Amino acid sequence: MNWCSLPGYWMGFEVLERYGCRLADGFLITLQLVGWSFCLGLLFSLPLALMRLKAPLPVRALLVGYMTVFRGTPLLVQLFLVYYGLGSLRPFWQEMNLWWFFRDPLYCCLFAFTLNTAAYQAEIMRGALQAVPRGLSEAGRALGLSKGVILFKIELPQALMIALRPLGNELIIMVKASALGSLVTLYDLMGATKFAFARSFDLAIYLVAAVVYLALVEAIRRLWAVGERYLTRHLVARA
Amino acid sequence: MSDWVALLSFGPDGWGLALLQGAWITLSVAVVTLPFGLALGLAVALAFRSSSPFWRTAATLYTTVFRGLPELLTLYIIYFGIQLLVEHLIKLAGLQSQFSISPFLAGVVALGLVLAAFSAEVWLGAFNALHKGQVEGASALGLGRFQTFRHIVWPQLLRAALPGLGNNWMVLLKETSLVSVITLQDTMFIATRANVVTKEPFLFFGAAASIYLFFSIVSSIGLWALERRSARGFAPVGRQA
């Protein structure tokens, strides 16, 4: 017997015993999907936010368009556009040797989620950068610091601190949104649960998934709060 | 290109009318959910501020659960759960009958429960922004509890909560796309079916995206105007309100 069928065995919950391993695999897929898309989004968000603020007008207009479209439409539509839309261009991708990417629901999810979360995270970064008091960069200029030094040593550290909390919220939103992958045949936690339900018609399996999602979200929320306290510890007034 | 125009037309072969009907359903779900979710959210916020630990714990539990669950999961649990529950009750009553919950109702209940959890935080923030002296002043003037709420607390609460509630509305509008998975024929459902029939995913999911984008942009303009209006007593000196 595998370890992943043990919880169901102990609880005497036959459906969970039978599908426990599928759920565990699904959970890992969910973690991978969320982890990768969030980190990639984070990677893109900073350059996007900086360009959104400082690039010449045509680039800025393009970025405003990108952010408006991806923040103004449901993630589900974006996912279907990638999975069914880009996925329908099979001959083209085969020629480009990219068919392995758009054939796989996991990569399609990763692609759509990254585009989506990058737009949201760029908006968070933009807000954070704009919230840094102007006087700080002016003081840097008065001291004769170069633009790069002002950006990396003065503006960014302050902005990232402001961005921490909304970024944590965005990560939690991504965990919840990853359940949409189940609608494009991905067997993430939600997909595996739907599979088990379709076989057993036992609603309790959804409640198991609910507990797992809740535990994951709570864990992220608390870990993030600890990290945030640590990173802003110099700002906390000593009692 | 002309194929695309024909496919989006309102004629018998076009999907234009179906998409418009879907857009109408999307809007209906959102508009019906809003008052239900906001009222429940206000009730949860009041429970948070209650002096009884029972209500405070209940409110914490409620927001933790419904903010943490994926909306899709909430929707499935409500949709299938209510169905199974009622069938169970029917069986207990010894009756023979089939029951199925309308997808519209299930969608409104599920989205409303989630909206309540998120808007409770917004209401709570607005309560905290309210100066304590306002309520004390009202009681010094001899106003009753209801009068205090209606004339002193509520107008200020609404103004402080408006930006957050506006965000909640934008999120809700996009979340309505989930009801398509429980066969409610909203924008997303129509686009999916049109794609199955015509094999034109870019056209129909693009059309669906445009509909949502249109609603989002109109909403954000409306919210901007509302916020401006609600803050008109606070315009800086020298600026025309």
Image (cartoon, rainbow, N blue to C red):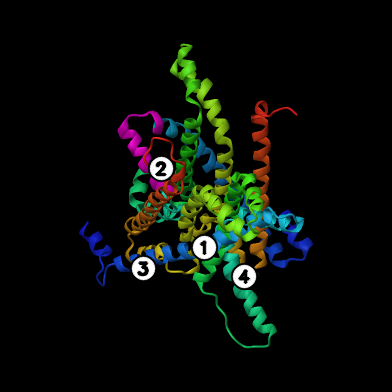
Please, is residue A152 above or below residue A1 in the view? above
Same-subunit check for callouts 3 and 4: yes
Q: Few, some or many C-alpha atoms within 10 Å of disc 1 (few <14, some 14-19, many ≥20)?
A: some
- Mark 4 Cα shell of 10 Å, populated few (<14), some (14-19), many (≥20): some
Residue pointed to by mark 3: B21
Pointers 2 and 3 in contact (C-beta within 8 Å): no
Q: Amino acid at mark 2?
A: Met
Q: Is residue A201 magenta?
A: no
Residue with the mark numbered 2: A67
Which residue in the structure is indicated by mark 4? B81
Q: Amino acid at mark 4?
A: Gly
Q: Position of residue A222 (x, y in %)?
A: 68, 42
Q: Secondary structure at mark 1?
A: helix
User: At 63% across and 79% down in the image, what residue appears?
Assistant: B87
* Residue numbers of the magenta segment: A52-71
Instruction: Report helix, strand or loop for mark 3.
Output: helix
